[in-house]
Amino acid sequence: MDRDQMRASESDRQIVMERLRQAVEEGRLDVPEYQDRVDAAMQAKVYSELDILLADLQQLPPPGYAEAAVEPTAVMPASLSKANQQLRDSANEGSRKWKITGVAVGIAAVVALVLFAIAPEIFLYFAIAVLVILVLFVVAAVAGLF
């Protein structure tokens, strides 16, 4: 089977994404183009799709070769390019949002369990209130108010 038609692994995609990150640091790609290529790399199924993402970055070898195995850096270097710093900041901001959301959902679940244990009739009142609101929305929609 031809290499171009062989299915790429997750580690192959990671190698390509690391190379694309390096290209941004070197100034070969701008941030929007980098994001487009990373999205395409995550959806790539075969090597030829990954090769296309690196084709115009001639200094970088194609994905999947043993000598090209690049380990992602665990420690953030002291000096980062402006584009790379923007990417890292946006990634950290996104993960913070998910952490806050997870904590909020956890607290809401605990509060709901405590309320259910103390006063189960509260959930009945809540369900009736939600149904009343839904009925009001349906009536408003039928009446043509929105």
Image: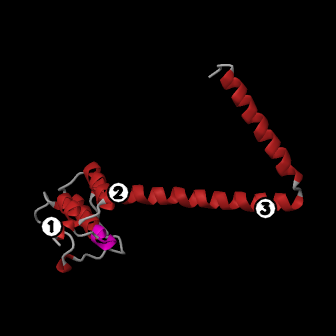
Tell me which segment is drawn in magenta: 9-14
Q: Please, which residue is most extreme toward the top here?
A: 144
**Residue 12 in picture, x, y percent from top left:** 27, 71
Residue holding disc 3: 113
Name the residue located 17 percent from the left edge and 66 percent from the top edge. Answer: 4
Q: Mark 2 falls on what kind of element?
A: helix
Q: Is residue 49 above or below residue 72?
A: above
**Residue 77 in picture, x, y percent from top left:** 31, 70
- Label placed on residue 87: 2
Instruction: Look at label 1 and name its amino acid.
Output: Leu
- Regarding residue 55, the answer to whether it shows in the image is yes
Q: CA distance from mark 3 to mark 2?
A: 39 Å
Q: Is residue 74 above or below residue 46?
A: below
Q: Mark 1 falls on what kind of element?
A: loop
Q: CA distance from mark 3 to mark 1?
A: 55 Å
Q: Quadrant of the N terminus?
A: bottom left
Q: CA distance from mark 1 to mark 2?
A: 21 Å
Identify the mark nearer the N-term, 3 or 2: 2
Crowd rating for badge 1 (residues with CA inside 10 Å; few <14, some 14–19, many 20+): some
Which residue occupies the foreground of this view, 56 or 51? 51
